[in-house]
Image: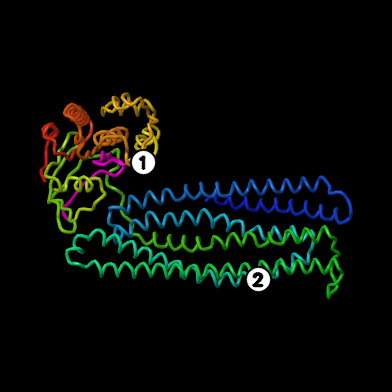
Amino acid sequence: MALQKQAGLAWIIDLGGAALFAWGIADGVAAAAAGQPVPGAAFAAMLAGGLVRAATAWAVPVLAVRGAQASTAPLRRGLVEQLLGSGAAPSSGQSAVLAIDHVATIEGYETRFVPARVAAAAAPLAAVAIIACASLVAAGILIGTLVPFVFGMILAGTAAKRASERQLEALGDLSDLFVDRVRTLPILRHFAAEERIARQVGAATREVANRTVAVLRVAFLSSAVLEFFSALAVALVAVYCGFGLLGLLPFPSPETLTLREAFFALAMAPEFYLPMRRLAAAYHDKQLGEAARTAIAAVPHLPPPAAEPGMFAGIAARDVGIAWPGRTVGPVSLSIGTTGMLALTGPTGSGKTSLLAAIAGQIVPSSGTLTAAAPGGIAWAAQHPLILPGTLRDNLALAAPHATDAAILAAIDRVGLTPMLAGRGASLDLPLDHRGSGLSGGERRRLGLARALLADRPLLLADEPTADLDDESAAAITALLRGLAADRAVIVATHDPRLIAAADAKVTL
């Protein structure tokens, strides 16, 4: 959290900018009240103070966001590998909430609350010290209002923690329910259970709404406590400074205030509570972040994969079955060493893609044993490859972020996409949307295969790599896969008889 702490220290520097600005205003007002021209130093102080505050307002979120992303990226990566498709969480809905939503919540906590906490620990004391230079009584007034404020915030914070935990629990239950009902939708329709399921989802949604309102209620309460004491402190300082200048204080004043000192103390008074106001604004993020960390800490720890990507020892499956609502894939037995090509074949819907997903570790088999590669040792050329908005270069570099343009162009040429680029007068900067608009089905498949080649993993999984291709292109892809099988393991799911004939072995589903 080094960057987040630096962001908090930047808020303390912001207090120095506020002091410069307040001194410039106080000096200018005092000079004007005395009938003198405003000194140039006052204008310079106001300008310098404004620039300091502008710089900190820019630097704080930049540092905080970078620090939060750096600290949560390993957590997100580990949870995705551990949960999604592994069965470690009670369901895929809970897995998605833990690996995606909860990590985003923790990122928000580290972005907003951690810098505010660092600043709130020191900035109010620094503000009191600066104000004490002008008025000891004004500084004492501010410290006096701090004690009941801290007590009120402790009470509000305890209630906020409980409400946040209940809200996250309700969100997880709703996600779990929704994913489960969508997965079993054909069965629900078969038994005409739509109305009952709609009532269940509606009740879960109302529960989330009620718990969210409870969280907001506590948040408004804590904000009201803070604003009350902040306004009270500024008002008391203003009353003291005004009556002190007029000589109307009902008690002997231990100090003699000038207009410059009184105006400076009054201008700096709001800065005393400003760090705590920032902390209170981010307090909801704290409660959600801590609740998310508690939920993630309860996830069972999974042992690391048996084989590292560089130690791929082949694939072995014995009587593997994959159960889906209404149908079952398998049992299937297969094996492949560190090289060679294995073809999975069978009619559409027989489970070829599901078996590839099980080999990749994205689906947990319901029966049998499967010895697979570590996720980092697998390259997958999907039937419908992921395409992100961006350029052709961006999409291919997903598999190898540090790949040079020459390596990317070589992969494009190996899968036969070079004529496509030449025919359109395009380059690696060819823009693509998320649908791959402008690319044919065969071109999209070859884009996915090129990305798998750039990944250069010991196991290549290819789903229907020759579908939607003409005979010449399909023959070229078959030859490419046959050549790749000389130094790595290749498993293809296909209906293509030529690709099946080129394989070293086949498994029919």
SS at mark 1 in the image: loop
Quick check: 393 above or below 274?
above
Of the two numbered discs 1 and 2 on the same chain, state the one appearing first in sequence. Answer: 2
Q: Nearer the viewer, mark 1 or mark 2?
A: 1
Identify the disc placed on residue 388: 1
| Amino acid on which disc 1 is placed | Leu
Q: Magenta region: which residues?
A: 367-386
Quick check: 14 above or below 473?
below
Horizontally, is 353 left or right of 245 in the view?
Answer: left
Which residue occupies the foreground of this view, 370 or 100? 100
Magenta stretch contains residue 71: no
Residue beneath the point at 89% across and 53% down: 35
Q: Which residue is mark 2?
A: 147
Horizontally, is 360 left or right of 407 in the view?
Answer: left
**Residue 137 figure quarter:** bottom right
**Residue 357 x, y percent position in the rendering:** 23, 47
**Residue 429 x, y percent position in the rendering:** 40, 30
Q: Would you call the spot at circle 2 few (<14 residues within 10 Å), some (14-19), or many (20 or more)?
A: few
**Residue 161 x, y percent position in the rendering:** 48, 68
Horizontally, is 236 left or right of 376 in the view?
Answer: right
Which residue occupies the foreground of this view, 76 or 235? 235
Whether tag 1 and tag 2 are in contact, CB under 8 A, the answer is: no
Outermost residue toward the right in this view: 35
Residue beneath the point at 76% across and 47% down: 45
Horizontally, is 134 left or right of 399 in the view?
Answer: right
SS at mark 2 in the image: helix
Residue beneath the point at 89% across and 55% down: 34
| Amino acid on which disc 2 is placed | Val
**Residue 476 x, y percent position in the rendering:** 20, 27
